[in-house]
Image (tube, coloured by chain):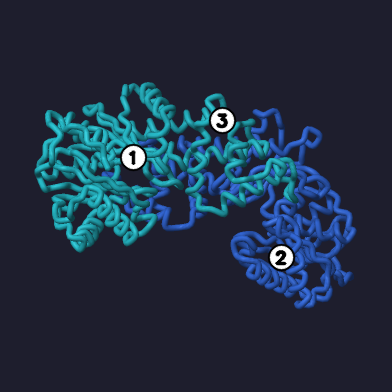
Chain colours: A cyan, B blue
Amino acid sequence: MCRQPLPPGGTRERIVTTRVWVAVDAGGSSTRCAVVTADGSCIGYARAGGANPISRGMPTAIAVIRQCIAAALEDADRPASTVHGVVVAMAGLGLATPLQQSVAESLRSDGIIADVHVESDAVAAFEAGTHRTSGYVLISGTGAAALRIEEGGVAATADGLGWLLGDVGSGFWIGQRVATAALEELDGRGPTTALTQKVLDHFGIDEDRRRQRDESRRLVSVTDLLVRVYGGPAISLAELARFAFDDVDDEASRGILAEAAAGLATTLSAVMAPSLPGPVVVTGGVLAGQPRLRRGVVDAMALRGHEVELERVPDGLAGAVTIGLRRAGVVIDASRHAHIRESLRR
Amino acid sequence: MCRQPLPPGGTRERIVTTRVWVAVDAGGSSTRCAVVTADGSCIGYARAGGANPISRGMPTAIAVIRQCIAAALEDADRPASTVHGVVVAMAGLGLATPLQQSVAESLRSDGIIADVHVESDAVAAFEAGTHRTSGYVLISGTGAAALRIEEGGVAATADGLGWLLGDVGSGFWIGQRVATAALEELDGRGPTTALTQKVLDHFGIDEDRRRQRDESRRLVSVTDLLVRVYGGPAISLAELARFAFDDVDDEASRGILAEAAAGLATTLSAVMAPSLPGPVVVTGGVLAGQPRLRRGVVDAMALRGHEVELERVPDGLAGAVTIGLRRAGVVIDASRHAHIRESLRR
């Protein structure tokens, strides 16, 4: 169940309206669903697995979303027929129109006859962080991108080009540099770093094997690392990113994070318009979870002459609620927005 | 047919010895085979397709090698029974022993009852560039690595860690940066560069689409590029490397090549021993084909206090000949080595 703080100016009472709104934030690793009333109070909540239509396929994504909505409605003790509107925030903007039709059709078969709207996860993240309808969102999770939002729509995008061509400052980008720093030390091409032991431990590579050499006269631990990394999907290098935040005194880690922060600042600067100073909402596992990287971005922006404050959100769920209620004509001002966020906090 | 320059101190005459040696350089994109006499004169030559056992599989690699040997023996007008020794240079050092057995068995069924030796392509490249048995080889083709060779064997290896974790200064590494520079310009994150038009042309992306924007408010040409690059194998970014050499005045290109040269110098430095100043043999499509990158490496080594001269070889064929004759007891001094190289030139 959700927290149910008092709505602004209101008293806690049996909610009289039968109408509810459903908000879904469908992410790559988990999906969250909230059932809210017209004042933005959360009365039901559920979590499910990942529902990224690109990595998991459309049928799986839709099945996960339906399951998560059904669980949240059960938590709220509300029938499907009371749902007035549904907003699903997810990656894969180009898929919005066919996705919207597929989601709407499948929800109809679950008894939800309602306005269904599929929104970009980035726009939902932006609206999760502010009641304003224009500003910026900077994302660093597995990938990284910045968007300028104007009147609730995307006005510009920078980066988000994927692990092979961009995503500068993302979890993959940092993790790849963590692996590279470890290999450069083992290979005699780079300085000693605390990252090396962490990377070897992560892959379960025995300390004893560090000093032996194979027929290429490489350290066996280097060959072991190559086998482990190339044996898995490239994107799993993102799992190594957290090691860069472990040791503030490690020079290699500091260099990687300084470059990540500068890269994210460049990405954000690329979408900034002089007439719109903010707000800047930040999200994604790396930026939302690592205050040191956020400080680095603020400092790098200051060097570029932009004084920014970063508003951190864990995901786009509060934004999906905001978008759904606005579509129904509810005015979301600063205090209503704060109530939505507070009500979703867990 | 091969060139047949006069052997050192010799006169051209009908070769009396019936014994010949076969040398094969099996590369990723092509395989070369030479048939030589005991004095290192090439009397038969053939080319075939790629024979990398890792990318193409062992059965294909062996089939290509057999076919190439048969064609070279036909060119030399010599029967299989006259072959006294075979050296096959190829990538995949770890596979040497099983590969050697497989190659030897399959050649026996072709009537070649001879000493068969499989050698690392890097060692063969080294021996193609010098008659000495100790020194260094620096490779930049699709991948990049440096090796220290001592008494004809590998004493140390640096980099060669593949496109995801290293290969600094390789064709992939340069090509990825060429693509990134183009995307940074299109994305508003980087400066104007001559590389952008070359990359768009390479992928056949229409100039008209450069200025339109799609629903993410990205340039359509950016989305087109992403679709093209992610639709193919990552390694094909190496095809873009050549554009970095086109325009000496392009700042982005100069930056990429300076970083590539510095990276290759770091890799070479990692295997250098103070007691062994050289020789340094360079090979691979990028280093062998681009004098500007070689000059960059020499300059970057000088900054590190190492004055090096780079001896360029197109491939390891002359090295495979050298190794084969040495295995038969032939002394290969500087003049014999020069004769081998001259005889193979085409």
- Disc 3 marks which residue? A252
How many C-alpha atoms fall within 10 Å of the one at disc 2: few (<14), some, or many (≥20)? many
Asked where in the image residue B66 lies, by quadrant, the reply is bottom right
Q: Are marks 3 and 1 on the same chain?
A: yes
Measured Cα–Cα span from mark 3 to mark 1 = 27 Å
Instruction: Choose the circle earlier in sequence order: 3 or 1.
Output: 1
- Disc 1 marks which residue? A158
Which residue lies at the image location 61% right of the left edge and 36% below the top edge?
A: A196
Q: Secondary structure at mark 1?
A: strand
| Image mark count | 3
Q: Position of residue B144 (x, y in %)?
A: 62, 46
Q: Chain of mark 3?
A: A
Comparing labels 3 and 2, the label whose residue is closer to the camera: 3
**For the residue marked with disc 3, what is the amino acid?**
Ala
Which residue lies at the image location 65% right of the left edge and 48% below the top edge?
A: A224
Q: Secondary structure at mark 3?
A: helix
Say whether residue B15 is left or right of residue A272: right
**For the residue marked with disc 2, what is the amino acid?**
Cys
Q: Is residue A149 visible?
A: yes
Which residue lies at the image location 56% right of the left edge and 27% below the top edge?
A: A251
Q: Are marks 3 and 2 on the same chain?
A: no
- Disc 2 marks which residue? B33
Q: Secondary structure at mark 2?
A: strand
Q: Is residue B28 above or below residue B260?
A: below
Q: Position of residue A83 (x, y in %)?
A: 16, 51
Q: Which mark is residue B123?
A: none
Nearer to me, A183 or B128: A183
Q: Position of residue A66 (x, y in %)?
A: 27, 57
**For the residue marked with disc 1, what is the amino acid?**
Ala
Which residue lies at the image location 9% right of the left edge and 43% below the top edge?
A: A16
